[in-house]
Image (cartoon, rainbow, N blue to C red):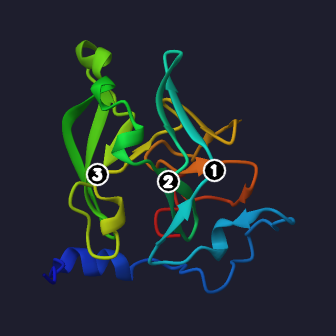
């Protein structure tokens, strides 16, 4: 079944200035073993990743997987998506909030189940019915490294600047990254 995208999605996609074909002058130089977010494509691509990814909440392992996908998109650090079978789903609850990504579709947000009385700040999101091209991550979860402890091969992940995006910054990634004011259409 072919999904017809709304006009606002097509307009949002057309606004991006950088699409991964060439680096802007302000891009940081990558060293051997590093990736520049300015080499990532737009539209984003899905890349299987078999490094060990662990997510911890309040000292307990919430997720542990070596069968993840990274989404690579120009100007943003990768986001790791973990299969639901590798996540202790009983520790999460849906918050009732959602947003729409012009590439992946509608995301639903999850909070830690024990935080329900605190307003349920989202720590994860999931695309239950992603747009074409992203069907492989249907039901997979990604986590905000600024709100919950995330690790890639034992390296603690840093949060993407700005608080909105959920990119995973590791020592292998160079930027600068979108997320701060003025970078919305990088």
Name the residue carrying label 3.
Answer: 139
Instruction: Answer above or below: position of 125 versus 68.
Output: above
Cβ–Cβ under 8 Å for marks 1 and 2? yes
Check the image and report above or below for 161 versus 70: above
In the picture, residue 110 is in which quadrant? top left
Q: At 31% from the left edge and 17% from the top edge, which residue is drawn?
A: 115
Task: State the residue position of label 1.
Answer: 51
Residue 68's mark? 2
The percent position of residue 137, horizontal first and vertical second, equals 35, 59
Residue at the far right in the pictured view: 32
- Write the residue at 24% across / 13% down: 117
Alpha carbon separation for disc pair 1 and 3: 20 Å
Spot occupied by residue 116 in the image (x, y as percentages of width and height): 24, 18
Mark 2 or mark 3, which has the lower sequence index? 2
Classify residue 129 as left or right of residue 79: left
Element assignment for label 1: loop
Asked whether disc 1 touches disc 3, contact meaning CB atoms under 8 Å apart, the reply is no
Question: In the image, is 155 to the left or to the right of 12?
Answer: right
Which residue is at 35% across, 50% downward? 140
- Distance of mark 2 from mark 3, alpha carbons? 12 Å
Image coordinates for residue 96, horizontal then vertical, percent: 16, 37
Front-most of 35 and 186?
A: 35
Q: Is residue 185 above or below residue 52?
A: below
With respect to residue 111, does 59 lie above or below? above
């Amino acid at each position: 079944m072919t999904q017809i995208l709304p006009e606002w999605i097509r307009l949002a996609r057309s606004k991006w200035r950088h699409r991964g074909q060439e680096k802007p002058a302000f891009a940081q130089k990558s060293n051997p073993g590093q990736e520049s977010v300015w080499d990532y494509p737009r539209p984003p691509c899905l890349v299987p990743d078999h490094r060990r990814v662990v997510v911890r909440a309040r000292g307990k392992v919430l997720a542990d997987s070596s069968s993840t996908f990274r989404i690579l998109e120009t100007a943003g650090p990768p986001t790791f998506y973990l299969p639901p079978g590798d996540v202790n789903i009983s520790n999460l609850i849906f918050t009732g909030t959602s947003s729409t990504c012009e590439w992946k579709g509608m995301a639903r947000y999850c909070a830690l189940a024990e935080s329900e009385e605190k307003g349920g700040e989202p720590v994860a999101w999931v695309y239950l019915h992603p747009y074409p091209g992203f069907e492989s991550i249907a039901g997979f979860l990604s986590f905000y490294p600024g709100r919950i402890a995330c690790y890639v091969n034992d390296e603690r992940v840093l949060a993407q600047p700005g608080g909105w995006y959920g990119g995973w910054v590791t020592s292998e990634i160079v930027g600068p990254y979108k997320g701060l004011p003025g970078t919305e259409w990088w």
